[in-house]
Amino acid sequence: MTYTSWDELFENLKKQKYYTDLQAFLDEEYKNKIIYPPRNEIFNAFNLTPLSEVKVVIFGQDPYPNPREAMGLVFSVRDGIKLPPSLQNIFKEIYKEYKVERELPKSGDLTYLAKQGVLLLNSFLTVEAHKPLSHKRKEYEQLLIDVISVLNKMHKPMVFMLWGGNAKKYHKYLTNPYHKVIETNHPSPLSANRGGWFDSGCFLEANKYLKENKEKEINWLQ
């Protein structure tokens, strides 16, 4: 089935048992524990990047588990929050590729990318405070597969940036010849410092593909 909007997809998902099971789980979690991001921000990635405007998709793992950081966009943090190490490495690589010499930005809010068509999506959309991967659930994995299936059916130029092992396992669902898949190591210090992140050229490569296919390039710089 093809969709013209995320709303259409989620209306259909509401009829799926796994999705109703997920909502029931979240009802209990938000009622009894501290969960990030706030519930009204879980689907921020979809709200800020309409289906028809998706050009680039970045998959992550799960939200930041610390207070006030997670905001429903992978790797993004709210204004006023110190840049987490992974986000620092993302900006460092962008600056390196575009030969920009300046201090890292004060704001780690990546809404400016979401509004350009970059779908910033965690694999698991929620997390319990201070417990990374505490919401690693089959229901979220199925949700991501369903989202990928929708994108995979869209015959328009699109770039999928798979950073790290968790993201790379979804490569097998990306079969559309109109789409480009770019794989790198994860930008977290533990992974990035082993090689495969810095000097990967992934941001330039994504824009090169968009330009070759007559799509507006992403302004990766704030």
Image (cartoon, rainbow, N blue to C red):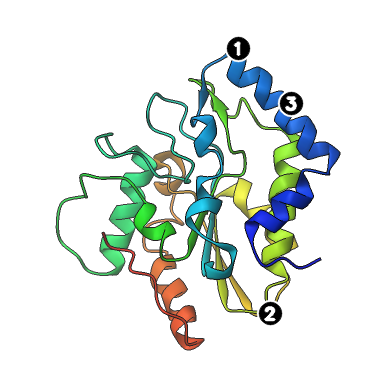
Residue under the point 56% across and 28% down: 127
Tell me the CA gap for discs 1 and 2: 45 Å
Image quadrant assignment for residue 62: top right
Q: Identity of the amino acid at label 2?
A: Pro
Mark 2 residue element: loop
Vertical placement of residue 179 versus 133, above or below: below
Q: Which mark is residue 42?
A: none
Image quadrant assignment for residue 42: top right
The residue that mark 2 highlights is 177
Residue under the point 51% across and 66% down: 56
Tell me the CA gap for discs 3 and 1: 13 Å
Q: Identity of the amino acid at label 3?
A: Ala
Q: Nearer the viewer, mark 1 or mark 2?
A: 1
* Quadrant location, the N terminus: bottom right
* Name of the residue lying farthest toward the left: 102
Where is residue 155? Give x, y as percent.
Answer: 67, 79
Mark 3 residue element: helix
Tell me the CA gap for discs 3 and 2: 38 Å
The residue that mark 3 highlights is 24
Image quadrant assignment for residue 78: top left
Relative to the observer, which residue lies in front, 40 or 101?
A: 40
Residue under the point 61% across and 25% down: 134
Vertical placement of residue 53 versus 36, above or below: below
Near mark 2 (Cα within 10 A), the count class, few <14, some 14-19 or many ≥20, is: few
Near mark 3 (Cα within 10 A), the count class, few <14, some 14-19 or many ≥20, is: few
Relative to the observer, which residue lies in front, 89 or 129?
A: 129
Where is residue 108? Give x, y as percent.
Answer: 31, 45
Relative to the observer, which residue lies in front, 89 or 111?
A: 111
Residue under the point 42% across and 75% down: 207
* Quadrant location, the C terminus: bottom left
Q: Is residue 132 left or right of residue 175?
A: left
Q: Identity of the amino acid at label 1?
A: Asn
